[in-house]
Every structure is written in structure tokens, then in C-alpha cells.
Image (cartoon, grey):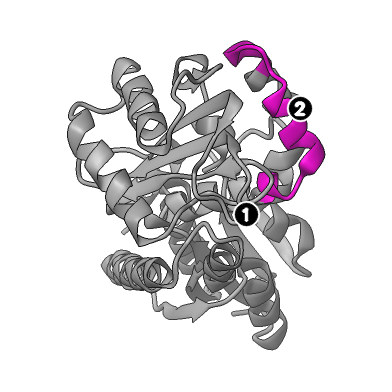
Amino acid sequence: MNGPIKHILVYLDGTEESLTAAQYAICLSKATGALLSAMYIVNTRALNDLVKSHIFIESEQDEYQRDLQEDARKYLRLMEKMAQEKSVAVSVYEESGAVQGVIRDFIRNNDVDLLVSGKVSNIRSRRDELNNDTERVIRNVSCSVLVVKDEERVWEMFDQMA
Amino acid sequence: MALLDLLEEKIIKVPLESDNKTEVIREMVEVLSTAGKISNPESVIAAVLEREAMGSTGLDKGIAVPHAKTTEVNDLCVALGISNNGVDFDALDGEDSHLFFMIIAPPNQSSQHIQVLSEIAGIAKSSAFCRMLKNSENAKEVLELFLEE
């Protein structure tokens, strides 16, 4: 681990883009020897806000929280499987809270020096910019961020990597 | 996923013609059906009404967010309707509702469902934007407002 990158974090949110980012992070970890961590955050802040605004009733909050926890386990298992295929060690974390705050704290407390993120959607309105968690994370974390694009190329790179 | 990813003219109805809660839900589900988003409208109507029976999604400031999770759709879909006269939707503040955001989600897309509902919760806080939406005369104007804001 003498290279410029010591600890990579990839944030999974269940989207295709985040899985592409996960594959890229695995390749990068293998090439550089950097530690690799993967995180899925159950966005309990959003669930609480929906109850406060009366869009959700409490039983819905519980139901959706269970759904998100299942998603977290599913995607983190997938991350472990993909990393294992490429003989890369990965530490996985299922967290809950507000996405931006949890990632920011993890980066600070674990000396993460590179966040690997899936590409963000095109921003077509100011509201898009304000509501997109990935966009806010990219703008606000303290470490460098690598935004993964060109998913076909990444898949090909991942498949070809021994 | 952003609300704008889901909005298109064919799922926006201005004005809604119905004058009661059940009929508004039916009218909006029919919009989704006509747009080819759902294939079994009766089942979706039943799911939305079942959710409403647990507690009204009529918020304050004239906004209602009827929603349901059902296996009748493969992808998250949204309909937006605007009622000029307002409809009694058992809203929190007792006022009639004018803006209706209907969200129908498959069971395996909870994360995206929450993102879109959160964005609508944000819209509900903006009185000025809601007023502009309410004054829109057609679907094109509604879409333009979302793109400008």
C-alpha cells in the first residue's frame, strides 16, 4: 500500500450506477492495493421526514425501513461476492441515518482518501441538484471523489480482470 | 431517481374533472392506464384506496399524495393532477386539495419510491411553487415549471 490511494470507499444505493462504481472500486483496489470499504445507508432521515410531513404513516415507515434493510444486505452481499471473485478483500457496512452525514463521518473517522461514486443524473433543475444525495455527497465530502462513467467499459474491465 | 425522470405530459392532467376523493383516485389511475403505465387499473385503484383507508395522504396547502405499493407495476410511475375547484381529500388542515401527486411503486423499488416522495415533500413546503403549479393551465406549463424551478 505504497501508492497514492490508501483507503477507498464505495457507496452503494441499489442503482445500476452504484454497482458499476463498485466494480470499478474493486479493480482499483486490486491495482493499487488500497483498502476497500463498501457502504449502504438506510436513509432513515428521509423516512422520518415523510412521517413528519404526513405522507407516510408509521406502519409504512416500518415497512419501508425493513425493505431498505433487505436491500442493504442484498447489495452488500453482492459486493462481497464480486470482490471475492477478484480476490479482493472488502469490508462492508450497513449504516442508517442521513446519507451525506454518514458518509462524511465515515470518511473522516476511517482515513478514507478516495470516494468512488456512480455517475449522477443530468441536472435539469435546481430541485434536481438539491434533492440528489449522490450530488450532495460528491460536493461535500473532504476526500477526493472519482465519478465512474462509461459502464460498458467498466464491466468489460471487471470481466477481464483476473 | 428524480421526479423529473418520471414526469411527462401524458401523465399530467389539467384540470381534473372529479369532485370527490374516490373519483380523483380513479381519474388519475386512468391517466396512468391510458399512458400505458399500468395494465390493471382496478387493482391499482384498490391498492390506493386501501392505503387511504389507513390515513389520508391529503397534506396541508392543498396538496395530496395518494400512493401505493403494488405488484401491478414493474417500474415506479407518477401521475400529477390539478383540480381547479379543489376536492375534499380529508386533508390535515381541512381545506380542499388542488394538487395531486400519485405514486405507484413496485415492491422492489422502495429506495426510489422514498426519493420521489421526499422530493414531493419538499415541493409541498414551497407555497410559491405550489401556487404556480395550481395556476397552470395545461400539462406543458406544469412541465416547464418543474424545469425552471
Checking the image for residue B132, the label placed there is 2
Q: Is residue A160 visible?
A: no
Taking the magenta stretch, the answer to whether it contains residue B128 is yes
Judge from the rendering whether residue A36 lies leftward or rightward of residue A3; answer left or right: left
Which residue is painted at 34% across and 73% down in the image? A66
**Which residue type does callout 2 highlight?**
Met
In reply to whether residue A5 is colored magenta, the answer given is no
| Res B61 seen here | yes
Q: Please, is residue B139 above or below residue B63 in the view?
A: above
Please give the name of the residue rendered at 52% of the width and 67% of the height, measured from the top-left corner: A47
User: Residue drawn 71% across and 56% down?
Assistant: A136
Total label count? 2
Residue A36: % across, % down:
50, 74
Residue drawn at x 40%, y 27% is B28
Image coordinates for residue B6, horizontal then vertical, percent: 49, 31
Mark 2 residue element? helix
Percent from the top left, x then y, of residue A141? 75, 66
Mark nearer the viewer, 1 or 2:
2
Per the rendering, the mark at residue A7 is: none
Foreground pick, A143 / B100: B100
Dot 2: chain letter: B
Relative to A41, is B145 above or below? Answer: above
Q: Which residues are magenta?
A: B122-141
Whole-percent x, y for residue B118 in the image: 58, 53
Q: Main secondary structure of the magenta part?
A: helix
How far apart are labels 1 and 2 at the CA level?
Answer: 29 Å
For the residue pair A88 and B23, the one nearer the viewer reads as B23
Pointer 1: what residue?
A: A134
- Image quarter (top left, top right, bottom left or bottom right) of the C terminus of chain B: top right
